[in-house]
Amino acid sequence: MRVYVRNRFFSLRQGSDVVNDENNPVFKVKGKWPSIRKTKFVQDLDGNLLYKVRNKFWHFLYPSSYIFNSEGERICKVKRQLFKIKTNWIVEGLEDEISVQGNWVGWNLSVIKNGQEIGKISREFNLFKDAFKVDAEEKDIPFLVALVIAIDNIQDNASRDRS
């Protein structure tokens, strides 16, 4: 299955649209505004919460983000691996070993779960907004959408901290 996570050009709540190849909505991503931690909610089309993504408020060298399940339990922490030329993301706290590896220039990332690739994430740029293409099995798509939101939030924080 392939979905696109499209950041809205102008949105006070910093939401995103998640659509399939036919441009039909698949999920909703709504942001909380105002939000210091850039909290976002991944919901199904009926508005049921699937995942909540929230940035870590205090960070030392690199920002990180947390993913919570629908019951509000923190299921993992997403952080960038330090001192690597290629982009490597670590997902801590899950029963499974998950990492995100790839080329940060083109955002061509592979999501590896227990040594097997379960999905691919790539970034598509547009003049007004950017989008992330996620290819994976249907059962993995909701978590990978939350993972994309977490990584995008971390990248936004890192670029804001550098300026």
Image (cartoon, rainbow, N blue to C red):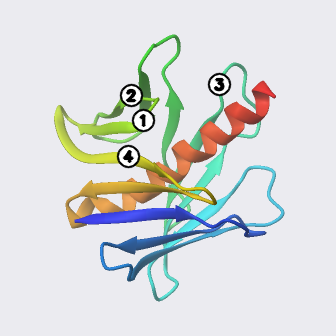
Q: Residue furthest bottom?
A: 46
Q: Earlier in the sequence, mark 1 or mark 4?
A: 1
Q: Are marks 1 and 3 in contact (CB under 8 Å)?
A: no
- Residue 162, relative to residue 133: is it above or below? above
Q: Are marks 1 and 2 in contact (CB under 8 Å)?
A: yes
- Could you tell me how far apart the alpha carbons at marks 1 and 4 are, in whole angstroms? 7 Å
In this rendering, the label closer to the viewer, 3 or 2 = 2
Q: Amino acid at mark 2?
A: Asn
Q: Amino acid at mark 3?
A: Tyr
Q: Residue at x 35, y 47 (%)?
A: 121
Q: Earlier in the sequence, mark 2 or mark 4?
A: 2
| Number of the label disc, if any, that sits on residue 122 | 4
Residue on which the image places disc 1: 106
Residue on which the image places disc 2: 103
Q: Earlier in the sequence, mark 4 or mark 3?
A: 3
Label 2: few (<14), some or many (≥20) within 10 Å?
Answer: some
